[in-house]
């Protein structure tokens, strides 16, 4: 349990490192005794001591309470420092923060999970949850896109899900050498290969441009705005709704999001520089 | 599913009348490709179009210094091949079946002839062609944006 205030980072130890690709690693963070809990879609603020603090989503299994798992792409000073933290190294952590994916809304319905690039990380806890309570859900489809086959996240696990057939898995990459037998093309093109029912709910996470194309395609397939959920990203400082750094129109991404119903965002989503 | 049913169910022929389907049917023949088989090669004369029924096809191009690259995948309901639209055209890409693939191969010259003879058929097929082209253009635009590239 967290007894420190929401602004005080707690030290946590890197217990395991998994190299996902050239610039992406997954870190398992833990303390000696603490039990963690979070809901799929939430994030923590991770602090690389002496460098800075950034929001990073949970990418692990919500039912595993002995560790917190984060998948991080090295894009700048802080994420690079986090990715370089060695086994046994210590980072600071505050959280969990933010709104979760609405798992209750999906129970009994079909779910389409659309992930672009690193967007699969915040969606992986959804898939763990779905697999754990599989009979509570209808048809589950995962559509995941990446730049190249090497950039596809969680390859072994995704392959296992594909074999198990509990989830209907479709993968696509933007470019590939000949001989790659998977799909080549944008992730939105995968939507044409799945059935969409009148009850389908969609969870979408990825770069904003990819989400815009996906929303358009989902709407073409008649998924209404109130059944499309998106994970939004904005730079953050406090993560608790004090500083306004993460403002998105009338909302703060840190406390009103990061998961939003498309209906809430509709008027802002297509405006540049919002 | 016989050839007529396969043609009727394919989006390329959606909305065509029975006589229009009957007019197109003699241009079509059912073809099957094993996974890995080349359907057509870059540079060869483009004399057919293919309506994919089941399976998957990769469009590949040889890029000097980089080898063969897969540029796009097509699947059931897609139209394979666009170079036939203008007679005398050659394939700009190589098409390879990625899984066992079932398709209707239509003779391009015969299709174009029928489109000329029956303007209503010509217009209907042209609309489907434009719809396919728009969809493919949208995908290519998003691909070109390279949205997953690291922001560094
Ligand atoms: C709610 C939330 C959840 C997130 N989850 C994850 C996660 O699970 N894994 C992960 O690796 N990252 C995640 N991020 C993004 C991460 O917080 C940023 O990459 C990080 O803040 C960059 O900090 P930096 O100091 O390393 O780089 P900076 O020096 O701050 O930025 C380097 C470059 O990256 C660009 N950049 C910064 N932030 C983003 C962003 N959010 N999206 C796209 N480009 C950006 C900048 O424009 C700049 O060009 C999340 C962000 C939010 C808001
Ligand atoms: S980060 Fe301070 S209000 Fe959201």
Image (cartoon, coloured by chain):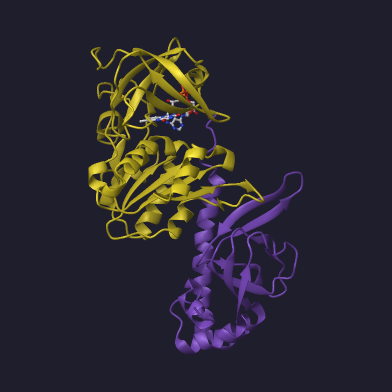
Chain colours: A yellow, B purple
Q: Residue at x 43, y 39 (%)?
A: A120
Number of dots carrying numbers? 0
Q: Position of residue A142 (x, y in %)?
A: 41, 48
Front in this rendered view, residue B134 or B38: B38
- Left or right of B80? Residue A31 is left
**Residue at the outermost front position:** A164
Residue B91 visible here: yes
Q: Is A248 above or below relative to A170? A: above
Residue A148 visible here: no
Q: Residue at x 58, y 42 (%)?
A: A149
Q: Position of residue A126 (x, y in %)?
A: 34, 39
Front in this rendered view, residue B52 or A229: B52
- Left or right of A101? Residue A164 is right
Q: Position of residue A143 (x, y in %)?
A: 44, 49
Q: Position of residue A79 (x, y in %)?
A: 47, 22
Which quadrant holds the C terminus of chain B?
Answer: top right
């Amino acid at each position: 349990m967290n007894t420190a205030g929401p602004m005080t980072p707690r030290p946590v130890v890197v217990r395991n490192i998994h190299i996902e690709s050239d610039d992406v690693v997954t870190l398992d963070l833990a303390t000696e005794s603490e039990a963690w809990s979070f809901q799929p879609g939430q994030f923590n603020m991770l602090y690389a001591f002496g460098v800075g603090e950034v929001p990073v989503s949970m990418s692990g299994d919500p039912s595993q309470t002995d560790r917190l798992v984060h998948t991080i792409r090295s894009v700048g000073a802080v994420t690079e420092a986090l990715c370089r933290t060695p086994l046994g190294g210590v980072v600071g952590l505050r959280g969990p923060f933010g709104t979760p994916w609405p798992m209750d809304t999906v129970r009994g319905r079909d779910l389409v999970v659309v992930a672009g690039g690193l967007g699969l990380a915040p969606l992986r806890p959804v898939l763990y949850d779905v697999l754990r309570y599989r009979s509570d859900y209808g048809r589950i489809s995962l559509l995941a896109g990446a730049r190249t086959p090497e950039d596809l996240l969680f390859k072994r696990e995704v392959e296992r899900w594909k074999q198990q057939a509990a989830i209907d898995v479709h993968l696509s990459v933007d470019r590939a050498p000949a001989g790659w037998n998977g799909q080549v093309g944008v992730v939105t093109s995968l939507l044409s290969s799945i059935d969409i029912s009148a009850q389908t709910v969609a969870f979408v996470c990825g770069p904003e441009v990819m989400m815009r194309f996906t929303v358009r395609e989902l709407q073409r397939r008649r998924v209404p705005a109130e059944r499309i959920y998106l994970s939004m990203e904005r730079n953050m400082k406090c993560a608790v709704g004090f500083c306004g750094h993460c403002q998105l129109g009338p909302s703060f991404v840190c406390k009103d999001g990061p998961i939003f119903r498309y209906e809430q965002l509709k008027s802002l989503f297509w405006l540049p520089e919002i | 599913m016989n050839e007529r049913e396969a043609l009727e169910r394919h989006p390329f022929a959606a909305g065509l009348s029975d006589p229009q389907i009957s007019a197109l049917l003699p241009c079509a023949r059912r073809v099957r490709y094993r996974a890995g088989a080349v359907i057509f090669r870059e540079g060869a004369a483009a004399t057919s179009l293919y309506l994919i029924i089941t399976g998957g096809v990769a469009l590949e191009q040889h890029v000097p210094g980089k080898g063969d690259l897969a540029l796009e995948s097509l699947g059931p309901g897609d139209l394979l091949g666009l170079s036939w639209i203008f007679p005398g055209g050659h394939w700009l890409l190589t098409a390879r079946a990625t899984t066992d693939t079932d398709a209707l191969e239509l003779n391009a010259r015969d299709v174009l002839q029928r489109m000329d003879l029956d303007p209503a058929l010509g217009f209907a097929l042209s609309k489907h062609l434009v719809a396919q082209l728009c969809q493919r253009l949208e995908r290519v635009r998003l691909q070109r944006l390279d949205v997953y590239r690291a922001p560094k």
